[in-house]
Image: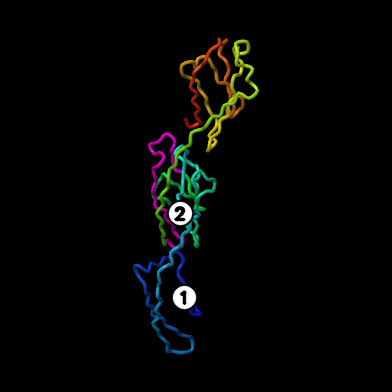
Amino acid sequence: MSTSGVVTRKTGVYLNSDLINEYIYRTQVTDPYNGTSDVALITINITDDTPATLTDNWSAGPYIKESELGGTTIKTTDYGSTVADYGSNQSGTWSSSNSSISINTNGTLSLGLNLSGSVTQSGDTIDSTITFTNTFGTTTTDSLTLDVVGNDAPTANFSNSGLTGNYNTNLATDGTALLTSTISDTESDVPYQMTISGTNGSSFTAVPQNSNSSSWELQANGYLSAGSYSYDVTVTDSYS
């Protein structure tokens, strides 16, 4: 208490209404010119600290792909680009009960470990309790369920546009392009890989035509004789 009667909390002292919700002080006032003094009992009520209100920016989910690595941000929609994060109406800190999910000082969610190569796959969920602690130590929690979605396989489209003249024994020579192919992928997990197999797979070679391997040529592997050739094409993304 100051000489003017203002009562303040001492620095470094924390109040907990769950333990003590009322302090009663005996206060005495004197001056240098009188022998008598005035005494009063002052009651200070300690009320509960108001917990923070938490918000998030997703209506369903949030989501993460089964092929993602630690540090990848969690998204608000399936295969979306908007980062999932929490908000609060107070200042404080965030924490996650599950080490698989990380949350930074801004409330942004990310992976805490690699899903790629783990037992966690498409259709699984990862649960965590997100805790926000305000500057007075009061906590607010939220139950989080993270949906793990599949990594879509890439697709390949083939075209013989402009190459129709190569389908004869004069032009089906070693290294000649017989087909062209473009690869696309929902997640753009480059580089891609194309392999040839099957009954006559050894008669062809797949050759990438650009840096991210999204364009390929199927070339004759040697001089091909007239006939019908059967082969299988397998296309994979960077996560196989």
| Residue under pointer 1 | 7
Residue count near mark 1 (Cα–Cα under 10 Å), binned few <14, some 14–19, many ≥20: few
Q: Position of residue 9 (x, y in %)?
A: 45, 70
Label 1: which secondary element: loop
Task: Determine whether 214 is above or below 111 in the image.
Answer: above
Q: How many marks?
A: 2
Residue count near mark 2 (Cα–Cα under 10 Å), binned few <14, some 14–19, many ≥20: many
Q: Answer with mark 2 or mark 1, whichever residue precedes in sequence.
A: 1
Residue 116 on the magenta span: yes
Q: Position of residue 84 (x, y in %)?
A: 50, 50
Q: Which residue ends up furthest to the left in the rendered image? A: 19
Q: Position of residue 177 (x, y in %)?
A: 61, 18
Q: Which residues are magenta?
A: 111-137
Task: Determine whether 191 is above or below 141 in the image.
Answer: above
Q: Amino acid at mark 1?
A: Val
Task: Determine whether 92 is above or below 200 in the image.
Answer: below
Q: Disc 2 versus disc 1: distance between alpha carbons?
A: 33 Å
Residue at left 49%, top 19%? 231
Residue 94, label in figure: 2
Q: Position of residue 186 (x, y in %)?
A: 53, 38
Q: Closer to us: mark 2 or mark 1?
A: 2
Are the residues flagged by discs 2 and 1 in contact, CB closer than 8 Å? no
